[in-house]
Image (cartoon, helix red, strand yellow):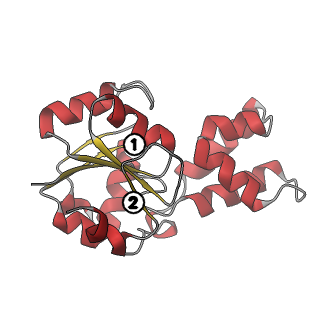
Amino acid sequence: MLNILWDFDGTLFDTYPAYTAIFREVMGDEKISEDEIFWQLKVSFSDAFEHFSLNDEQIKAIRKMARQLQPEDLTPFPGVEHVLKQADKNVIMTHKERDDVLSILKFHNLDGYFTDMVAGDDGYPRKPHTASYEFLHEKHKVDLAIGDREIDILPAKDLGIRTCLFQNNTPGADYYLSHYRDFNKIIK
């Protein structure tokens, strides 16, 4: 039996290239590298807003443009469907709005793999607060939490759930994955 709690952005879907392009467009500063924007976003949107000293108008523009991305603009990571098929239950905890997540999953024919979700507009405190993870864990007995950022695994660690960082080697996770094709090597 394997019940997995998934983060969405950067874990199920390769969304950061699109977000990086939006930041770059709004900032209009060609001197700032895409890599610097990408890695600040990988910490968190709030961290990137602060790091680049963005004003309220810029932040609103970025959030609006991010919400206007279409499902076809965002692609699932290669091999993620193979992992979804292996789980008994898959649940999502994301800061993204529920309608956006559902439309992206449906467009990519992945909606049938998920039993439950806590989304950004559900009223739970933001990660790394444990409330949303506690809710999903109590309801679905989560065995593993997969995320691409440290804030994705911290709530799971606090609750005694095994953790996996995807494309991130920050110390503290139980498992590390660079590609989903290697999932069977780490989970036995």
Find residue 51 and report its horizontal and vertical position in percent.
76, 37
Q: Residue at 17% across / 66% down in the picture?
A: 86
Q: Residue furthest left?
A: 1
Placement of 90 over or under 118, stated as above or below: below
Q: Nearer the viewer, residue 64 or 16?
A: 16
Q: Nearer the viewer, residue 29 or 6?
A: 6
Residue 94: image tag? 1
Find residue 121 and report its horizontal and vertical position in percent.
39, 33
User: Do callouts 1 and 2 mark residues in contact (Cβ within 8 Å)?
Assistant: no
Tell me where residue 187 sits by quadrant: bottom left
User: Is 79 positioned to the left or the right of 151 in the image?
Assistant: left
Residue 9: image tag? none
Local packing at callout 1 (Cα closer than 10 Å; few below 14, some 14-19, many 20+) is many
User: Is 109 positioned to the left or the right of 55 in the image?
Assistant: left
- Tag 2: amino acid: Leu
Find residue 167 and report its horizontal and vertical position in percent.
50, 61
Q: Secondary structure at mark 1?
A: loop
Find residue 150 and report its horizontal and vertical position in percent.
50, 42
- Tag 1: amino acid: Thr
Q: Residue at 48% across / 38% down in the picture?
A: 151
Local packing at callout 2 (Cα closer than 10 Å; few below 14, some 14-19, many 20+) is many
Q: Earlier in the sequence, mark 1 or mark 2?
A: 2
Residue 12: image tag? 2
Q: Residue at 54% across / 48% down in the picture?
A: 170
